[in-house]
Image (tube, rainbow, N blue to C red):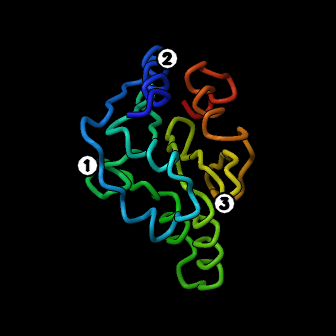
Amino acid sequence: MNQQFREISDGLKQAGWSVEMRRERAKRPQIFEERFSWLPDVIVDFACSFDRVIAPKEQAWLITWPQLSGESDSSFAWNQWELDSLSAAEGDEEWKAEIRGFWDDHLPLLLSVKSGYAFVAIRKDFAIVVGEEPEFEETVELAGGLLDFLQMLCERNRRLDQLI
């Protein structure tokens, strides 16, 4: 386990998050090969290092290995907001292609149901963005990279109050 991941885990716990790290090295979920091959190994390793990371009020959670590998009992799929957008675009193949294209370039890191449905994702240029319903595909940059975002979580940054 990466020392930096342990430090992040400790920081999240100190901020009130429920964190369960994986006890054994997880097999890399196929979705990373099929759809997100642009992600560096360190980000994939981070996602695969945890079984659960849930915000203090249980209204937001990080996407972790069980969701990505299809072994979660969560009511929400890791790509739930993409599925919802595709459902809204039913019958409009051009719109559906645009939605898929957007999500091919955005891996969700966090889902939130605190103030409606929202997400935080890593964009293909590695910036961290936030989007919310009803137009999930309209995002705003939140942080310059994964470590900046995780630091925001650990510090209980007020910019995240609507999500967490």
Quadrant of the rendering where the C terminus is positioned: top right
Q: Under tag 2, what secondary structure?
A: loop
Instruction: State how far apart marks 2 and 1 are (Cα).
Output: 25 Å
Within-10-Å neighbours for mark 2: few <14, some 14–19, many 20+: some
Secondary element under disc 1, as helix, strand or loop, is loop
Amino acid type at image mark 2? Ala
Q: CA distance from mark 1 to mark 3?
A: 26 Å
On the rendered structure, is 152 left or right of 16?
right
The answer to whether 133 is drawn above or below residue 149 in the figure is below
- Residue drawn at point x = 63 percent, y = 57 percent: 136
Residue depicted at x 46% and y 14%: 14
Tell me how far mark 2 sits from mark 3, CA to CA.
Answer: 29 Å
Question: Residue 67 appears at what percent x and percent y?
Answer: 35, 51
Residue 135 seen from this side: no
Q: Quadrant of residue 1?
A: top left
Q: Which residue is mark 3?
A: 137
Callout 3, which amino acid? Glu
Q: Nearer the viewer, residue 130 or 145?
A: 145
Which residue is more in the foreground, 29 or 100?
Answer: 29
Q: Is residue 54 left or right of residue 152?
A: left
Query: Does label 2 or label 1 sit earlier along the sequence?
Result: 2
Residue drawn at 30 percent across, 58 percent down: 70
Q: Which mark is residue 15?
A: 2
Name the mark on residue 73. 1
Q: Position of residue 56 (x, y in %)?
A: 43, 23
Asked if the residue at tag 3 contacts the one at tag 1, i.e. Cβ–Cβ closer than 8 Å, the answer is: no
Q: Amino acid at mark 1?
A: Asp
